[in-house]
Image: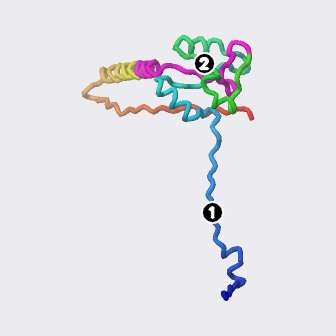
């Protein structure tokens, strides 16, 4: 016959080791596009982004017009069913069927167009900086030499906040 010895110390809660789960919290990003959606479009050579459709409660026709001329198109709710639960789909008007969050609508554009625009503005910026530098150095005098120790820094604006 086997005897089992139970002592009070073995039954104490502190002595029973439970597996602890560590939780972390991240503030939700309202503009986050699911990775699966981004990867699916990236494999097709298309980039996704949020387009502003209203500004201070009024439709922003000028901004949307410029974006449409650049080649942006609205993403239809049928194309991204996984975003239906976290986004609003417009039922009527100019943006019918567009996936929206707040005053933004999800748009798509070929990645080649985005890269071409980025390269164009990088080249334009570089040529303007070279022109400024050459104009600065043109006024250089051996009695009072000029040294160019300037550097540029890009600062981004605030992150958008949505109404709760």
Residue in the picture at 35% in, 34% down: 149
In three-dimensional space, the C-alpha distance between marks 2 and 1, rounded to whole angstroms, equals 46 Å
Bounds of the magenta span?
A: 92-120
Residue 14 position (above or below residue 49)? below
Secondary-structure class at tag 1: loop
Examine the image and state in which quarter residue 97 appears. top right
Examine the image and state in which quarter residue 7 appears. bottom right
Residue in the picture at 68% in, 74% down: 14
Image quarter of the N terminus = bottom right
Residue 118 position (above or below residue 14)? above
Q: Which dot marks residue 159?
A: none
Image spot of residue 99 (x, y percent): 66, 24
**Residue underneath mark 1:** 20
Q: Which dot marks residue 74?
A: 2
Residue in the picture at 57% in, 13% down: 68
Image spot of residue 155 (x, y percent): 51, 33
């Amino acid at each position: 016959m086997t005897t089992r010895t139970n002592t009070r110390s073995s039954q104490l809660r502190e002595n029973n080791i439970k597996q602890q789960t560590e939780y972390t919290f991240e503030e939700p990003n309202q503009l986050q596009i699911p990775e699966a959606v981004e990867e699916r479009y990236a494999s097709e050579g298309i980039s996704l982004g949020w387009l502003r459709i209203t500004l201070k409660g009024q439709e922003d026709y000028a901004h949307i017009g410029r974006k449409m001329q650049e080649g942006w198109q609205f993403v239809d709710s049928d194309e991204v069913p996984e975003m239906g639960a976290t986004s609003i789909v417009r039922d009527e008007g100019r943006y019918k069927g567009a996936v929206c969050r707040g005053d933004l609508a999800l748009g798509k554009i070929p990645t080649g167009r985005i890269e071409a625009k980025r390269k164009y503005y990088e080249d334009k910026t570089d040529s303007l900086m070279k022109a400024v530098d050459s104009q600065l150095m043109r006024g250089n005098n051996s009695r009072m030499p000029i040294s160019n120790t300037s550097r540029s820094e890009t600062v981004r604006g605030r992150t958008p906040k949505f109404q709760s």
